[in-house]
Image: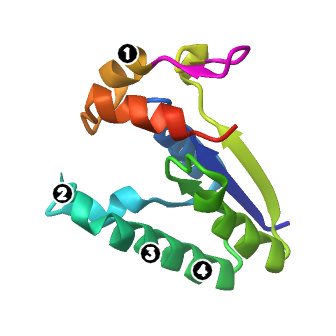
Amino acid sequence: MKRMVVLRGLPGSGKSHIANTLAKNLGYIICSADYYWIENGEYKFDLNKLRNAHDFCYNMAKALVSQEKNIIIDNTNTTKQEYGKYTDLAFFNKYDIMIEIANFDGKAFDEKTKQWNVNFLYENNVHKVPLGTLGKMAKRFEW
C-alpha cells in the first residue's frame, strides 16, 4: 500500500527525527521545505522566499506520488490549509494517509491543554527560530 505521513509540529518538536527514522527504517522519502534552503551544505533561510520553499516541497511530493513512493512531509504544517494540499494529493492518488503531531518525548507540548512549550522548542530547534516567532506559530497552530 502507498503511504504518506504528514508530520506537524513547531520547530524543535521532533519532526525531522521522526522523518529520518521512518526514512532509515522503512525506506520512506522525505519531502521538506527545509531542503530548499540548503546551499553548499549550509542552511540559509530567507523569509522572502518562504512560498518558493513550500512550492518546491509540494512539487517534490507530487513527483514522488507519481512514482508511487512512500513519502513523509516534514514541515510545520501549522494550519489545515498548509497540510490540506498534501492530504488532497494523497487522497486523489489512493494513498493511505497518516497525520502525526510531533511531541519530542512529550516535552514539546502538553497533550491535555494543547499548549506548546515554546521555551523547550527554542532550546531544541536546530534552525534557531526566535522565541517570539515560535510563540506566534504556537498561537496559529490548528488542532
Q: Position of residue 14 (x, y in %)?
A: 50, 32
Q: Amino acid at mark 4?
A: Lys
Structural crowding at the residue carrying mark 2, measured as other residues with C-alpha within 10 Å and reported as few (<14), some (14–19) or many (≥20): few
The first of marks 4 and 2 along the sequence is 2
Residue where numbered disc 3 is placed:
55
Q: Secondary structure at mark 1?
A: helix
Badge 2 is on which residue? 41
- Residue at figure coordinates x 41%, y 74% from the top left: 56
Element type where label 4 sits in the image: helix
Q: Label 2 is placed on what type of residue?
A: Gly
Disc 2 from disc 1: Cα separation = 28 Å
For discs 3 and 2, the disc positioned in front in the rendered view: 3
Graded by Cα atoms within 10 Å as few (under 14), some (14 to 19) or many (20 or more), the crowding at tag 4 reads some
Disc 3 residue type? Asp
Q: Which mark is residue 119?
A: 1
Q: Which residues are magenta?
A: 110-117
Give the mark, 3 or 1, whose residue is nearer the N terminus.
3
Q: Dot 3 surroundings within 10 Å: few (below 14), some, or many (20 or more)?
A: some
Name the element at disc 3.
helix
Where residue 28 appears, as percent x and y from the top left, is: 62, 58
